């Protein structure tokens, strides 16, 4: 009856699935996904999934990555602008 189109606008849940900013920070630092995968002791496939938002790392890995990359924890989390309603 009241079928709402979910493709017209990304939902908050969809936006939250793209929380991490690992790929962005790696690019800024000139580092590779493979390098960070070794540092975090995860597979390249896992790192690729995180960087391409097919899955998200848990907070333990976000914390470890922030330490390894020498950035604030908040730099690895979603940009607030991406979560705002358009």
Image: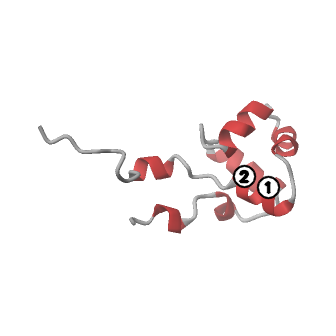
Circle 1 SS class: helix
Quadrant in the rendering for residue 74 = bottom right
Snapshot quadrant of residue 47: top right
The residue lying at 51 percent from left, 68 percent from top is: 81
Q: Quadrant of residue 30?
A: bottom right
> Would you name the residue on which mark 2 appears?
23
Q: How far apart are the two marked residues, 1 and 2, measured between alpha carbons?
A: 5 Å
Horizontally, residue 72 falls left or right of residue 17, namely right
Q: Position of residue 78 (x, y in %)?
A: 58, 59
All told, the count of numbered labels is 2
* Residue 2 circle label: none
Q: Is residue 24 above or below residue 62?
A: below
Does residue 45 lie above or below 65 as drawn?
above
Instruction: Label 2: state its secondary structure.
Output: helix
Q: What is the quadrant of the C terminus in the image?
A: bottom left
Q: Position of residue 58 (x, y in %)?
A: 62, 42
Q: Residue furthest front?
A: 8
> In the rendered view, does 41 fall on the left or right side of 46?
right
In the rendered image, the residue lying farthest to the left is 1
Crowd rating for badge 2 (residues with CA inside 10 Å; few <14, some 14–19, many 20+) = some
Whole-percent x, y for residue 82 in the image: 51, 63
Q: Are marks 1 and 2 in contact (CB under 8 Å)?
A: yes
Residue visible at 72% across and 52% down in the picture: 23
Give the x, y percent position of residue 56.
Answer: 60, 42
Residue indicated by mark 1: 26
Q: How packed is label 1: few (under 14 Cα within 10 Å), some, or many (20 or more)?
A: some
């Amino acid at each position: 009856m009241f079928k709402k189109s979910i493709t017209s606008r990304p939902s908050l849940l969809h936006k939250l699935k793209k929380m991490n900013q690992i790929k962005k920070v790696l690019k800024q630092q000139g580092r590779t996904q493979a390098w960070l995968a070794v540092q975090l002791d995860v597979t390249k496939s896992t790192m690729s999934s995180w960087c391409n938002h097919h899955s998200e790392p848990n907070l333990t890995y976000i914390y470890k990555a922030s330490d390894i990359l020498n950035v604030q924890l908040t730099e690895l989390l979603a940009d607030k602008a991406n979560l705002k309603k358009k």
